[in-house]
C-alpha cells in the first residue's frame, strides 16, 4: 500500500494533514486519547488537529511519525506549513480564524486586523517597524488585507467586535486615515456584516482590564480563545479557560454601548476627524 502523499502547502494544508493524521491514527488502532497520551496532550487536542482547527507543531509531528510509523511524513509537512506570511506567534490563530463560524473580539487600542483599512494597517506596521523597507511593509499590509477578505462572505463568520473607546480616540496616522478607518467599520455595521459595540471610558473598570481577547467558535470542533501581547500570542483550548473568557466577553457586552449607540459614536468621531477637531 502506498504511503501518505506529501501535502501541497498552498491548498487547504491543515485540512489535508488533519485527514492524514486521522487516517494514520485509525490504521494504528489508536483512539484520539491514546495518541495524545505519549504527547502529553488531550484527546480533544488531537481532534482539533484532525479537524484542521489547530496547526500541527513540529515537536508533535516528529513524535507522531515515531508513534504512527509514518516515516517523517508529518515532520516534512509540518516544516512546509511553517512557511507562513504571518508572524510566528499569530500563525495558528490566523488559520483558526479562517475556519471559524463565529469570532468575538475585544480590542483595547487598535482596530482589529480583520477591520483595518490599507491606510490604517500601513501606519501600524510603520510604527512597529520604523526602519523596514517599503517592500517589507507592503508584504505585511497585503497579508493583513488578504486575511480580512473572510468578512466578505455574506454568511460566515459572524464577527462581533467590542472596541474600547481608546481605539476610536487614538489617532493612527493623519485625520483622513482615521476617518476612513472608522467609516469602514460603520459601513460594515450598517450592512449588517458585523456587530460592533464601543466600550466607553465612562464605564470605568471592566472585565478585561488586562488586555485584548478573541474567541472563535467552529462547526465541528470545540471553541478556542486567543490572547496576545507584544510579539507573542497563545491559542487556548482548555474548556474552563475558554468558558471564563466567554464570560469576560459577555460582561464586556453588558457594559458596552448598544450597537445602535455605538454606531452613532463611531460615525460622530469619524466626522470629528474629517473636520479636524478630534481631541483624544
Image: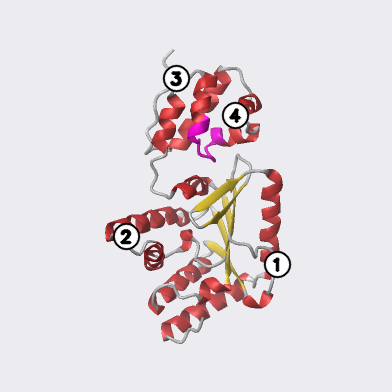
What element does badge 4 sit on? helix
**Are circles 2 and 1 on residues that touch, CB within 8 Å?**
no
Distance Cα–Cα, label 2 vs label 4 = 40 Å
- Bin the neighbour count of mark 1 within 10 Å (Cα to Cα): few under 14, some 14-19, many 20 and up: few
Colouring scheme applied when the structure was drawn: secondary structure
Q: Position of residue 232 (x, y in %)?
A: 51, 52
> Any mark on residue 132, and which?
2
Q: Which mark is residue 71?
A: 3
Q: Position of residue 33 (x, y in %)?
A: 65, 27
**Which one is in front, 17 or 264?**
17
Which residue in the rendered view is the most extreme toward the top? Answer: 1
State which mark lies toward you, 2 or 1.
Answer: 2
Q: Quadrant of the N terminus?
A: top left
Query: Image height check: is 191 above or below 63?
Result: below
Q: CA distance from mark 2 to mark 1?
A: 41 Å
Disc 2, SS: loop
Task: Where is residue 221? Give x, y as percent.
Answer: 61, 40
Name the N-terminal-most of marks 2 and 1. Answer: 2
Q: Nearer the viewer, mark 4 or mark 1?
A: 4
What residue lies at 52% left-to-right and 61% top-to-bottom? Answer: 193
Which residue is label 1 attached to? 254
List the residue tagged with mark 4.
39
Q: Nearer the viewer, residue 208 or 265?
A: 208
Q: Is residue 169 left or right of residue 8?
A: right
Q: From what the image shows, is residue 111 above or below residue 178?
A: above
Position of residue 111 in the picture relative to residue 9 (left or right) = right
Q: Nearer the viewer, residue 7 or 188?
A: 7
Viewer-closest of 199 and 262: 199
Q: Is residue 170 magenta?
A: no
Helix or strand or loop: what does disc 3 sit on? loop
> Which segment is the magenta one?
49-60
Amino acid at each position: 500500500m502506498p504511503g501518505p502523499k506529501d501535502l501541497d502547502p498552498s491548498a487547504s494544508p491543515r485540512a489535508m494533514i488533519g485527514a492524514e493524521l486521522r487516517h494514520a491514527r485509525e490504521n494504528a488502532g489508536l483512539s484520539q486519547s491514546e495518541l495524545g497520551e505519549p504527547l502529553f496532550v488531550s484527546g480533544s487536542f488531537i481532534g482539533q488537529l484532525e479537524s484542521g482547527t489547530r496547526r500541527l507543531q513540529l515537536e508533535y509531528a516528529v513524535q507522531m511519525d515515531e508513534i504512527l510509523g509514518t516515516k517523517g511524513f508529518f515532520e516534512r509537512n509540518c516544516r512546509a506549513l511553517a512557511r507562513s506570511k504571518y508572524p510566528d506567534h499569530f500563525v495558528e490563530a490566523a488559520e483558526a480564524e479562517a475556519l471559524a463560524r463565529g469570532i468575538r473580539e475585544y480590542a483595547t487600542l487598535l482596530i482589529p486586523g480583520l477591520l483595518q483599512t490599507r491606510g490604517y494597517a500601513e501606519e501600524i506596521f510603520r510604527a512597529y517597524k520604523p526602519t523596514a523597507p517599503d517592500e517589507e511593509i507592503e508584504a505585511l499590509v497585503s497579508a493583513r488585507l488578504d486575511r480580512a477578505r473572510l468578512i466578505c462572505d455574506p454568511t460566515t463568520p459572524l464577527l462581533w467586535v467590542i472596541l474600547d473607546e481608546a481605539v476610536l480616540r487614538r489617532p493612527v496616522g493623519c485625520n483622513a486615515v482615521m476617518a476612513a478607518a472608522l467609516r469602514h467599520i460603520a459601513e460594515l455595521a450598517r450592512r449588517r456584516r458585523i456587530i460592533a459595540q464601543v466600550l466607553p471610558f465612562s464605564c470605568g473598570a471592566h472585565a478585561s482590564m488586562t488586555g485584548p481577547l478573541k474567541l472563535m467558535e467552529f462547526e465541528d470542533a470545540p471553541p478556542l480563545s486567543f490572547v496576545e501581547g507584544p510579539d507573542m500570542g497563545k491559542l487556548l483550548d482548555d474548556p474552563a479557560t475558554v468558558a471564563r473568557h466567554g464570560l469576560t466577553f459577555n460582561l464586556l457586552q453588558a457594559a458596552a454601548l448598544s450597537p445602535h449607540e455605538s454606531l452613532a459614536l463611531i460615525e460622530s468621531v469619524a466626522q470629528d476627524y474629517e473636520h479636524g477637531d478630534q481631541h483624544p
